[in-house]
Amino acid sequence: MTRAAVLAGVGATVPPRVVTNDELARRLDTSDEWIRTRTGIVQRHVIDPGMTTGDLAVEAGQRALKSAGTTTVDLVVLATTTPDRPCPATAPSVATRIGLVGVPAFDVAAVCSGFLYALQVGSDAIAAGHAERVLVIGAETFSTILDPADRSTAAIFGDGAGAVVLRAGQPDEPGAVRHVQLGSDGSMADLITVRGGGAEERSGGRPPLPEDAYFRMAGKSVFFTAVRRMAESSRTVLERTGWQVTDVDRVVAHQANVRIIHAVAEQLGIPADRAVINIDRVGNTSAASIPLALADGAADGRLTPGDRVLLTAFGGGATWGAATLTWPDVMVG
């Protein structure tokens, strides 16, 4: 009998501190209008001193488990670009703090595509019979790696976490993850990067450059590449699923930029109003953005049971991906 991963729970959290566009404008060469018109962002949430990615991951994970009505899973996969430490991975600590001691747990690093990569790992573990339940988390504290003087990134990114619980089920069940399609191209590594802190810098034979400690992004190139790759990946996964574009009820794209989301929808021929958007309130939360949008969409009724949902993302690496699933009758934790 064919097994499939079925979405059984969803949860999300953002830090309490809100940073508005007007607050950023007081210290950067920017304005509320500039940020809104170019990104669609009105505000973002930022951690307070002492708070970590792991803290957000624990909260989102606990909420997803509550939503699923379970306290146990067989695997924890955490997608993040901002781990609590370079070593060890953050996922084991998160699992232990949730009460999942002894459960295998590891991080996945695929930047803004990270949640889809983690979703693939979790789905495959269930399909292969290695797990009955998997907790998949996307969590980021991008505020810890941003150059506070760089308006091109400081205005875009926020902190947050989202999580889903997958359980073993049947491919035709509501909530079943139908297909996931992933890709990467390492020749584009410099489009989205933090150059410092790794083996490349430490073995390079020169003193570290202060600017290399910060996140950098080639915005214009990222925009056009993201639209192309997200649209291509979406077409591929729709074909594998056997869905036509007209079958898609909702698009939940990585919340990178509202113009990217609309451009992807336009290229696919999907009405823009079918896109679930929350970037205006939380900004770009990288690997956390898709599960955060799923939680928001479920909470406010934009995602309803039976909806045929397309997920898609593009991130550093470069990495990209898309997935299809039918939305279950699930309460947000």
Image (cartoon, helix red, strand yellow):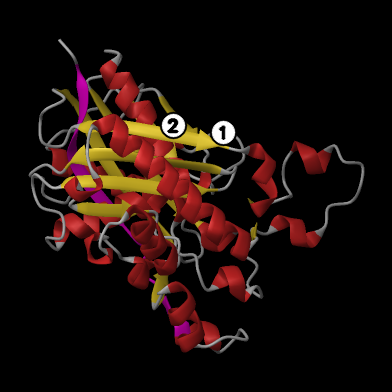
The residue drawn where x is 11% and y is 45% is: 330
- What main secondary structure does the magenta stretch of the protein show? strand
Marks 1,2: beta carbons within 8 A: yes
**Can you give x and y, in whole percent of width and height, for residue 180 in the image?**
35, 33
Residue ID for mark 1: 88
Is 333 placed left or right of 19 in the picture?
left
Please say if 95 is above or below 303.
above
Is 34 placed left or right of 161 in the picture?
right
Residue ID for mark 2: 92
**Can you give x and y, in whole percent of width and height, for residue 155 in the image?**
52, 74
Please report the bounds of the magenta region as a residue range: 3-21
Total marks shown come to 2
Does residue 98 appear in this view? Answer: no
The residue drawn where x is 43% and y is 68% is: 259
Please say if 314 is above or below 135.
below
Circle 2 Cα neighbour tier, 10 Å, few/some/many (<14 / 14–19 / ≥20) = many
Q: Amino acid at mark 2?
A: Pro
